[in-house]
Image (tube, grey):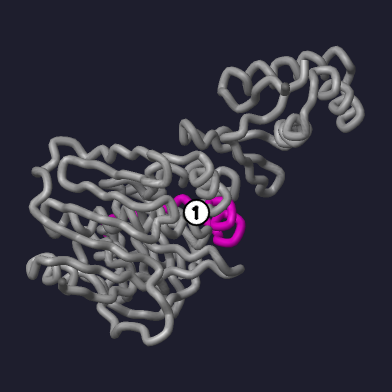
């Protein structure tokens, strides 16, 4: 399943950390460097598998751990309303 | 019809009203300028009084219908176009007039990507502006009072220009206790402090991302249109990336200036 960032969101990067604004709820969420890395991929449209591969390649972590992290990240962002299914 | 040209930061506002008392309120609170010969005003506002009642609560209700944006509180009704350049305002009294114009001005400067209005006092020390932010009761006005004889550019709502590389701050007419200086020239912003009253004086740096996270609720802004609201985070990001910020723990005396200067 392909995910993309919700249209009412925007993010700024400062010194390796990311702040995402939900402009409908006027709520901000902080992401660490890895979160920001994944956010940028989702912005272009990404699946859990794509995020998993990117984490393995970028950070050299085991695939199982990367998949677990990608799934958790997607679940959390979905819960916060920051991402939606890509059509 | 009575008219006046008012200047806030580097924006010109044309105000019209049929009422003498409204014009008196404007003259008391804002810097009047001669009508500019060439430049057109940034903002046109028509004001009337006698609207509503003393508010029971201070929530502003905002809605957008087509290209009209309406801000509605018990004591004022503000209707503006979605470019935030032409507005009609009905207010209860002079205090309400100031607050409603602040509401409009905030939307105007965010829309243009020009800057922000922040819940902060601003004090000038050696030609540079130091911002002190916090919620009501945190000590913004106290810091301004304790900083005498330095110039106080704001005691409640600081005007911050982020359109250029170097953030600037201006005399603010949106005050809670002190009077505007009507000083026309801006000063560069040297620092931003988030205030905590304490028995010990201390100053600790805040990382830029944490700063954005912590100042979003200190911006005077009433979200209605997500396309506009996203501009706020980009402006906060500019501020955080360009101005050093600190947690400031201060006593009720002026010793904190030793940590800043």
x and y percentages locating residue B224 in the rendered image: 41, 40
Q: In the shown orientation, is residue B232 left or right of residue A39?
A: left
At 73% across and 34% down in the image, what residue appears?
Answer: A43
Q: Secondary structure at mark 1?
A: strand
Assess disc 1: are there few (<14), some (14-19) or many (≥20) residues with their C-alpha within 10 Å of its C-alpha: many
x and y percentages locating residue B101 in the rendered image: 28, 58
- Report which residue position mark 1 lands on: B246
Q: Is residue B247 magenta?
A: yes
Q: Quadrant of residue B145?
A: bottom left
* On screen, residue B200 above or below B19: above
At 74% across and 15% down in the image, what residue appears?
Answer: A71
At 14% across and 70% down in the image, what residue appears?
Answer: B23
Q: Is residue B105 visible?
A: yes
* On screen, residue B127 above or below B209: below
Looking at the image, which is closer to me, B246 or B54? B54
Q: Is residue A84 magenta?
A: no
Looking at the image, which is closer to me, B228 or B121? B228
x and y percentages locating residue B173 in the rendered image: 27, 67
Using the image, name the chain to which the residue with label 1 belongs. Answer: B
x and y percentages locating residue B105 in the rendered image: 36, 59
Look at the image and tell me in which quarter the N terminus of chain B lies.
Answer: bottom left
Q: Which residues are magenta?
A: B236-252
């Amino acid at each position: 399943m392909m995910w993309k960032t919700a249209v009412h969101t925007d993010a700024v990067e400062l010194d390796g950390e990311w702040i995402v604004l939900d402009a409908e709820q006027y709520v901000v969420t902080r992401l660490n460097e890895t979160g920001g890395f994944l956010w940028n991929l989702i912005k272009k449209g990404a699946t859990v598998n794509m995020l998993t591969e990117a984490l393995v390649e970028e950070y050299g972590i085991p695939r199982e751990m990367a998949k677990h992290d990608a799934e958790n990240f997607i679940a959390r962002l979905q819960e916060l309303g920051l991402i939606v299914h890509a059509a | 019809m009575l008219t006046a040209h008012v200047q806030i930061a580097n924006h010109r506002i044309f105000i019209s009203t049929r009422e003498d008392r409204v014009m008196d309120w404007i003259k008391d609170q804002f810097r009047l300028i001669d009508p500019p010969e060439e430049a057109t005003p940034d903002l046109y506002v028509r004001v009337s009084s006698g609207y509503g009642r003393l508010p029971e609560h201070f929530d502003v209700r905002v809605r957008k219908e087509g290209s009209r944006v309406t801000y509605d509180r018990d004591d004022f009704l503000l209707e503006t176009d979605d470019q935030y350049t032409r507005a009609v305002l009905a207010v209860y009294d002079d205090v309400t007039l100031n607050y409603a114009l602040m509401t409009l001005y905030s939307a105007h400067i965010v829309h243009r990507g020009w800057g922000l209005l922040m819940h902060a006092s601003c004090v000038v020390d050696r030609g540079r502006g130091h911002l002190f932010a916090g919620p009501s009761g945190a000590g913004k006005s106290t810091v301004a009072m304790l900083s005498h004889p330095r110039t106080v550019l704001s005691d409640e709502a600081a005007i911050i220009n982020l359109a250029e590389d170097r953030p600037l701050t201006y005399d603010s007419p949106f005050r809670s206790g002190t009077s505007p200086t009507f000083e026309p020239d801006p000063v560069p912003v040297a620092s931003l402090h988030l205030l905590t009253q304490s028995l010990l004086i201390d100053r600790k740096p805040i990382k830029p991302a944490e700063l954005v996270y912590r100042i979003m609720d200190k911006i005077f802004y009433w979200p209605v249109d997500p396309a506009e609201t996203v501009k706020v985070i980009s402006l906060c990001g500019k501020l955080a990336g360009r101005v050093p910020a600190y947690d400031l723990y201060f006593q009720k005396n002026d010793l904190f200036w030793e940590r800043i200067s």
